[in-house]
Image (tube, helix red, strand yellow):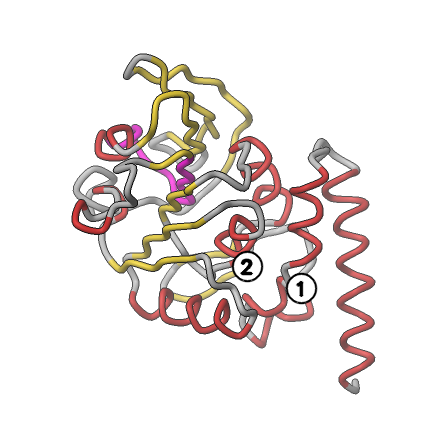
Amino acid sequence: MCGQEKKDRFCTNLQRMLDRDLVGRDITDPRVLAAMAEVPREEFVTDSHRSQAYSDGPLPIGMGQTISQPYIVALMTQELRVDRECEVLEIGTGSGFQTAVLSKLAKKVYTIERFGELAESAQAVLGRLDVRNVEFHIGDGSCGWPASKLPPSGCFDRIMVTAAVPSIPEPLIGQLVEAGFVVVPVGHGGSQRLMRCERKAGELDEKRICDVRFVKLFGKHGFEQ
């Protein structure tokens, strides 16, 4: 298949994903839909899975990790309620696809990945796509962003966790602004509860969104290895 034919196929599959898997369900935020349309998901999957880039399912990216299905990426992004004034902390860079989507909506994205190989790959892809408002860190995401590298405000307007936690790590709560939101999958078993929590007077007001299935977040304030 020649380059133009591949491009046309990706465009067709992208439009099908937008119409069927996102708009056809409950993704209604036009900014989220535009971001999902702008980020080429095929750039974030392995060569052997490029033909499945716009199928509505997770795909392996190596190191025992996955790129989430497009619907879940869009749903979590919509629930996070990001705007152009937001500084967003993402826990679990993975392939960098969710990072790229957030970068289209936020002022700046700070993203943490524990696997250096994945972080370097994601950084390379975002570089090729000329994404410039993302800062990367390799380390334990359950501990939050390093204190020495925090933004001037000292906290984040939004936090997204792209791996399951047994409970929301205290360091993340401490780095969330008042009235800020965190979207995170919480649970011990094979499936978890996707939660959106708003910080109010230092406490989290929780809303359950749906059941999901994520890989675990290992770390000091996550799951034990």
Give the residue pinned by disc 1: 52
Q: Which residues are magenta?
A: 158-169
Where does the image place residue 218, in percent across and percent down from the top left? Answer: 26, 47
In the picture shown, does residue 192 fall above or below 70?
Answer: above
Where does the image place residue 165, in percent across and percent down from the top left? Answer: 32, 36
Number of other residues with Cα within 10 Å of mark 1, as a class: few under 14, some 14 to 19, many 20 or more: some
Q: Residue at x 51, y 35 (%)?
A: 212
Proximity of marks 2 and 1: CB atoms separated by less than 8 Å: yes
Q: Residue furthest bottom?
A: 2
Q: Camera-side residue: 27 or 89?
A: 89
2 falls in the magenta region? no
Where disc 1 sits, the SS reads helix
Q: Amino acid at mark 2?
A: Leu
Give the residue pinned by disc 2: 59
Asked which quadrant contains residue 26, the reply is top right
Q: Camera-side residue: 187 or 79?
A: 79
